[in-house]
Image: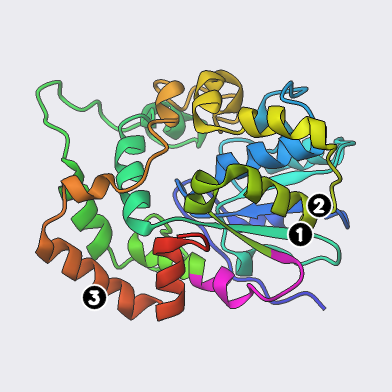
Amino acid sequence: MERERRRYQTSLEDSTRWDGFELRPDDIVISAPSKSGTTWTQMVCALLIFQTPDLPAPLTTLSPWLDMRIRSVEEVHAQLAAQQHRRFIKTHTPLDGVPTHPGVTYLAVGRDPRDVAVSLHHQSHNLDRRVIATLLGEQPPEPTPADTAPPDVRSTFLAWLANDDSPVKNLDSLRGVAWQQSVAWSRRHEPSVVLLHYGDLSHDLDGQMRRLAHRLGIPVAEHTWPALVEAATFEHMRQRADDLVPDERQPIFKTKRRFFRTGTSGQWRAWLTADDAAAYFERLGALTTPDLAYWLHHGTLG
């Protein structure tokens, strides 16, 4: 019996777009908060499935973002229905908003929330919100005056920290990130759920790719591994930004290469004061369990 699903409807996504979608027994669903390693995980899945760095199509074509509202749901469902390869589907919807189906593997990706906040700050300046609003059928925002100074990282972080919107409406806050990760953490022992961590991918990409191949039941010839692992490195992905950014083939990013900014962790240290850090840990402690908080900060290998 399928679990009752929670509805999430954010500024860009609507989980009801999963309604009526026919999952296949070997599908892979990749669920993670924004800027937590979703695209990286999609790339790893693509390399494992196609067994070559030379992918047959752009990543967003191979692995569409099902609940993103800039394309019609009918178009996305039809695109996925036509795929003959093993499907790997992107979503930023928490696992309790996604349908369950026998045989489907659900990949949940974690990252230090402080790094998520910094990455969200930089992405916000790379999104073309006028293009996005037009695609959503909404009124485009007024252009920002040229002499307006953008907020710095610390200001953005503190707003992200304090935001108390319900996660069903906003997942791009500490509350939203903690909620989504808590849902995945509560299901981590289920055979169909695999947890990955951004830090683990950074520290041992080869080992994490082999682990995932094993969990997905995908055999890979030993001589093939070096090329696949190299293609999944952050620098290699940045060089292929035109084919890998999650833009749904629409000009929603001002600069595609800026989507793959640094791939590093810990940049928040340059911005946060001791009081900021204390406020963060207090807030996170109220939103998560200690074991989840430890995993978010350290991964499995940290």
Task: Between residue 61 and residue 109, name the one nearer to us.
Answer: 109
Quadrant occupied by the N terminus: bottom right
Label 1 crowding class (10 Å Cα cut-off): few <14, some 14-19, many 20+?
many
User: Disc 3 vs disc 2: which is toward the camera?
Assistant: 3
Residue at 35 percent across and 29 percent down: it is: 126
Label 2 crowding class (10 Å Cα cut-off): few <14, some 14-19, many 20+?
some
Of labels 3 and 2, earlier in sequence is 2
> Are the residues flagged by discs 1 and 2 in contact, CB closer than 8 Å?
yes
Pointer 2: what residue?
27
* Relative to 273, 49 lies left or right: right
The image shows residue 230 at horizontal and vertical percentages of 62, 29
Q: Quadrant of residue 284?
A: bottom left
The image shows residue 52 at horizontal and vertical percentages of 77, 27
Q: Is residue 96 above or below residue 44?
A: below
Query: What amino acid does circle 2 point to?
Result: Asp
Secondary structure state at the residue bearing disc 3: helix
- Label for residue 233? none
Alpha carbon separation for disc pair 1 and 2: 6 Å
Query: What amino acid does circle 1 point to?
Result: Thr
- Whether residue 48 is visible here, answered yes or no, is yes
- Label for residue 105? 1
Secondary structure state at the residue bearing disc 1: strand
Of labels 1 and 2, earlier in sequence is 2
Quadrant occupied by the C terminus: bottom left
Task: Between residue 208 and residue 136, name the one nearer to us.
Answer: 208
- Chain part drawn in magenta: 182-193
Pointer 3: what residue?
282
Label 3 crowding class (10 Å Cα cut-off): few <14, some 14-19, many 20+?
few
Secondary structure state at the residue bearing disc 2: loop
In the image, farthest residue toward the front: 223
Q: Is residue 86 above or below residue 10?
A: above
Q: Is residue 163 above or below residue 141?
A: below
